[in-house]
Image: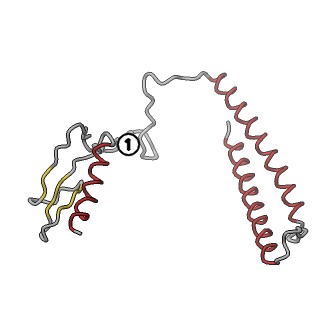
Amino acid sequence: MMKHAFCRPLAGLLIVAASGAVHGQIYKCTTPAGSVEYTDVNRGKHCKAMELPGVVVAAPPKHVAPAAPASGNRLGTAPALVPGEFPRVDAAQQRARDADRRGILEEELRAEQQKLAEQRKAYNNGEPERQGDERNYAKYLERVAGMRDSISRTEKNIDALKREIANIR
């Protein structure tokens, strides 16, 4: 019994070791009861850092303090920084991209509106025709509820597409 309790953490450790880069240090800790635990948290004098051959231990990420707000900025947020090598797009090319985007969104909107019209026709004001495999009334009600949910989702998609189109310059 004790032999198997030791094998599980060891197997987990071997999987972590074989998987490549580990994001942090692994510690072998002995609890006051005498059992051995493997963890990524150093819990004091009963824990020893393990050196795993062939495993690269990455340093934990350093947290960077947020940038101070710009002095002339009324909103109190720092202006967006653009890297020096970030590709810039001229106004004509941006207008062309916006026009393409608008066309795609309008096409999606037409497709969703057509889908909604078909769904509403099939829904028939909450009383769609029963299908041959719906001898059980509960099965029919389940299909009607699914149709109602589908109509609601399509209406939300249409609203989102209209908002997106309105946001294009």
Disc 1: which residue? 69
Query: Measuring 87% from the left and 55% from the top, which residue is drawn there?
Result: 118
Query: Measuring 25% from the left and 39% from the top, which residue is drawn there?
Result: 55
- The one nearer the camera, 168 or 60, is 60
**Badge 1, how many Cα within 10 Å: few under 14, some, many 20+?**
few
Q: In the displayed structure, does residue 121 sit left or right of residue 68?
A: right
Q: In the displayed structure, does residue 60 sit left or right of residue 72?
A: left
In which image quadrant can residue 95 be found? Answer: top right
Q: In the displayed structure, does residue 113 sit left or right of residue 67?
A: right
In the rendered image, residue 90, in percent from the top left (x then y), is placed at 60, 21
Identify residue type, mark 1: Pro
In which image quadrant can residue 17 be found? Answer: top left
The N terminus appears in which quarter of the rendering? bottom left
Question: At numbered mark 1, what does the secondary structure look like: helix, strand or loop?
Answer: loop
Q: In the displayed structure, does residue 85 sit left or right of residue 140?
A: left
Q: Residue furthest left?
A: 45
Is residue 136 placed above or below 59 in the rendered structure?
A: below
In the rendered image, residue 154, in percent from the top left (x then y), is placed at 75, 56
In the rendered image, residue 58, in percent from the top left (x then y), is placed at 26, 40
Is residue 159 placed above or below 139 in the rendered structure?
A: above
In the rendered image, residue 23, in percent from the top left (x then y), is placed at 29, 45
The C terminus appears in which quarter of the rendering? top right
Query: Measuring 85% from the left and 69% from the top, which residue is drawn there?
Result: 133
- The one nearer the camera, 2 or 103, is 2
Q: How many marks?
A: 1
Query: Measuring 82% from the left and 72% from the top, which residue is drawn there?
Result: 140
Q: How was the colour assigned to the protein in this rendering?
A: secondary structure
